[in-house]
Image: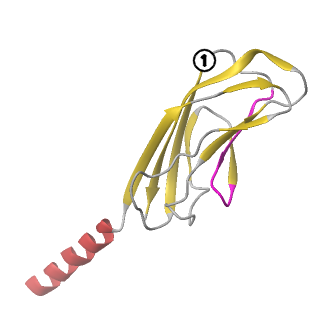
Amino acid sequence: MIKYLLLFCLSFTVHAAGEGAWQASRAGLTLNHRGESVSSAPLRATGPVTGAMTLVAWRYELNGPIPAGLRTRLCSSSRCVEIDSQSGTTHAFAHVSAAESLRFIWEVPGGGRLIPALQVRRIAVIVNYR
């Protein structure tokens, strides 16, 4: 009986050791014109990670009003996900390598200058992986 209990505990420990998370944040940027896309600098793990993403949480802070038609995407090198709020979670990056960086992309349709400019104050992600 003790042998089976030890085997069960060991398998649980091995499973838990394969899970992890990384987080990254940085200052934002400014979008001055409609019809242009602007990308954040990449957000990446600070150390080596192995495994695939399971759940990604995001957050960005705007300084000022939200322009009508604002389109925001969160992207890895292999896929982009449309996000419709300034914070949330997604499973859309499941099976993407946890070592990949993520970046935000903002766009306001139309043409001409944005008055006032769209100012993104801060961006952040938390990536859970297994």
Q: Nearer the viewer, residue 39 or 89?
A: 39
> Most extreme residue toward the right, as rendered?
111
- Looking at the rendered structure, the secondary structure element under dot 1 is loop
* 128 to 118, vertically: above or below: below
- Image spot of residue 64 (x, y percent): 64, 15
Is any part of residue 1 visible from this angle?
Answer: no
* 93 to 125, vertically: above or below: below
| Residue name at image x 53 percent, y 65 percent | 97
Which residue range is magenta in the image?
A: 69-79
Q: Quadrant of residue 9?
A: bottom left
- Image spot of residue 116 (x, y percent): 74, 13
Is any part of residue 39 visible from this angle?
Answer: yes
* 93 horizontally vs 13: left or right: right
- Image spot of residue 126 (x, y percent): 46, 46
* 104 horizontally vs 69: left or right: left
* 79 horizontally vs 43: left or right: right
> In the rendered view of the protein, which quadrant contains the N terminus?
bottom left
- Image spot of residue 119 (x, y percent): 65, 22
Q: Nearer the viewer, residue 38 or 108?
A: 38
Mark 1: give few (<14), some (14-19) or many (20+) Cα within 10 Å. few
* 71 horizontally vs 24: left or right: right
To which residue does mark 1 refer?
63
